[in-house]
Image (spheres, rainbow, N blue to C red):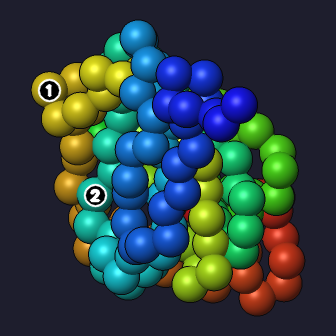
């Protein structure tokens, strides 16, 4: 008996950027891969999700999650150099962004309706942009797993 889509879906993504692969009822599974706009020197904003947590799992390569403390303004930025095959649950309402190396692949699980209407963005100041660059440099130069400025 041949497997059909009624029993099993097999999805893959080897491109660049973010790609949803499975939407089912209230949830979505996606893959995030390297993209130039997520290089530390190109990051100019953070986002938060007002209606859902968002789960990240590093499958390949390296990825740093950046978190911003504060509600209307970001007051402190933290960085976590993700470890492969660990689950990172970014809580609802938390400012965040990330940077990936060219070999990175991150699995993302989120609500299916997560989009621009419930995921506000905040622009980073020039000082905060520089902090992102410094945090990334610090994480990846010495293998640190958590850095704050």
In the foreground, 112 or 71: 112
In the image, residue 82 above or below residue 16: above
In the foreground, 82 or 31: 31
In the image, residue 25 above or below residue 17: above
Is the residue marked by circle 1 packed among few (<14), some (14-19), or many (20+) residues within 10 Å? few
Q: Secondary structure at mark 1?
A: helix
Q: Residue furthest top?
A: 25
Q: Quadrant of the C terminus?
A: bottom right
Q: Which residue corresponds to mark 1?
A: 117
**Mark 1 and mark 2: Cα distance apart in space:** 16 Å
Question: Is residue 71 in view?
Answer: no
Left or right of residue 61, residue 76 in this image: left
Is the residue marked by circle 2 packed among few (<14), some (14-19), or many (20+) residues within 10 Å? some
Q: Quadrant of the N terminus?
A: top right
Percent position (x, y) of residue 93?
41, 24
Q: Which residue corresponds to mark 2?
A: 45
Task: Count the marks.
Answer: 2
Percent position (x, y) of residue 76?
50, 49
Percent position (x, y) of residue 77?
52, 54
In the image, residue 124 above or below residue 137: above
**Residue at left 23%, top 43%?**
121
**Residue at left 58%, top 44%?**
10
In the foreground, 127 or 86: 86
Left or right of residue 85, residue 133 in this image: left
Left or right of residue 8, residue 46 in this image: left
Left or right of residue 36, residue 56 in this image: right
In front: label 1 or label 2: 1
**Residue at left 44%, top 54%?**
97
**Residue at left 38%, top 53%?**
19
Asked where in the image residue 50 lies, by quadrant, the reply is top left
Q: Residue furthest left?
A: 117
């Amino acid at each position: 008996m041949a497997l059909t889509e009624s029993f099993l879906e097999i999805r893959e993504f080897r491109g660049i950027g973010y790609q949803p692969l499975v939407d089912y009822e209230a949830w979505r599974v996606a893959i995030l891969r390297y993209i130039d706009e997520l290089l530390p020197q190109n990051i100019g904003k953070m986002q938060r999700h007002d209606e859902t947590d968002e789960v990240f799992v590093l499958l390949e390569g390296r990825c740093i999650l950046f978190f911003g403390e504060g509600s209307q303004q970001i007051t402190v930025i933290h960085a976590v150099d993700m470890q492969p095959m660990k689950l990172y649950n970014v809580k609802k309402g938390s400012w965040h962004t990330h940077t990936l190396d060219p070999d990175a692949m991150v699995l993302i699980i989120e609500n299916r309706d997560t989009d621009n209407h419930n995921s506000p963005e905040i622009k980073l100041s020039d000082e905060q942009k520089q902090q992102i660059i410094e945090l990334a440099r610090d994480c990846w130069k010495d293998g640190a797993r958590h850095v704050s400025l």
